[in-house]
Image (cartoon, grey):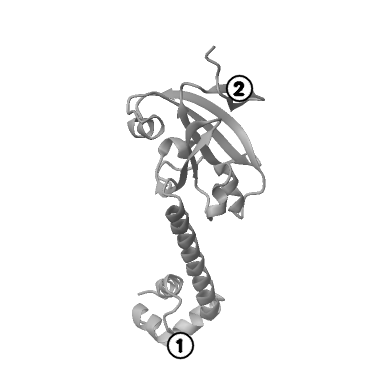
Amino acid sequence: MSEQTIKARVIQVVQNDPFLSIEEIAAEVRTTPRYVRTILSEANISLMQLRKQYAKHMEHQLYRTRRQVLVQEIDPQIRLVKIKDAAIAEHLGQDPDTDLLRISKLQHLHNNPCFCQLTTYLEIEVGVEDFSGPLRQILASAKAVDQIQLKQSWVEVVANQPSLSKLLLNSEDQPLLKLSYLLTDHNLPIAVETLWLPTEGILLRNQSGAIEIAGESSNG
């Protein structure tokens, strides 16, 4: 194994598991503990610092998991899942196979049932208190987000969503309205918010280029 390969291998092993001892790293790379110390010193890598960062990261991941489980235990209608959605990834300027986080909840808007979804590539934390208003407010928990803005909105009538139709209307063959909003941060796409609603009893309004639910339509 060349010297350059040994150096790269030592750094890779340390980054993957900073809790290994110098001797264990040396044994895995098949070099001497002294050479491992030299490589780490030249690369300005501190095992102690890496261990602290790793522990903090694991604590953060555990905290996120506890919060998400708590949310789902309190309200079974709330869902948090990792998905791949090529169409939404394209809207967000991401690769088609990018892992996205989708948060969903069932609520009522103007006395009409509404299934809401927020899909993003950002790393965000979700707590029970985040579901008291629009899902887009959850984006504020992402450290990189400065100002959430609406860039584009569009509406479709979708007739092939039997599970959602059953959830909202207790019938599998009813068409639904699908309202989508592209959300940005300083013109950078960060999320797509989607609302699914019955086609009847909904009044839509175009306000400054944004499609909004204004209330119930009048039948008389």
Provide the residue designation for mark 2: 205
> Of the numbered discs in the image, which one, if any, rests on residue 82?
none
Q: Quarter of the image for the N terminus: give it.
A: bottom left
> Of the numbered discs in the image, which one, if any, rests on residue 34?
1
Amino acid type of the residue that numbered disc 1 sits on in the rendered structure: Arg
Mark 1 neighbour density, 10 Å: few (under 14) some (14–19) many (20 or more): few
In the foreground, 158 or 94: 158
| Residue 204 against residue 58 in the figure, above or below | above
The reply to whether residue 111 is in sight is: yes
In the foreground, 47 or 163: 163
Residue in the image at 53% along x and 50% along y: 122
Amino acid type of the residue that numbered disc 2 sits on in the rendered structure: Arg
In the foreground, 92 or 80: 80
Q: Position of residue 101 (x, y in %)?
A: 46, 48
Residue in the image at 57% along x and 46% along y: 132
Q: Position of residue 142 (x, y in %)?
A: 58, 53
Residue in the image at 47% along x and 24% along y: 156
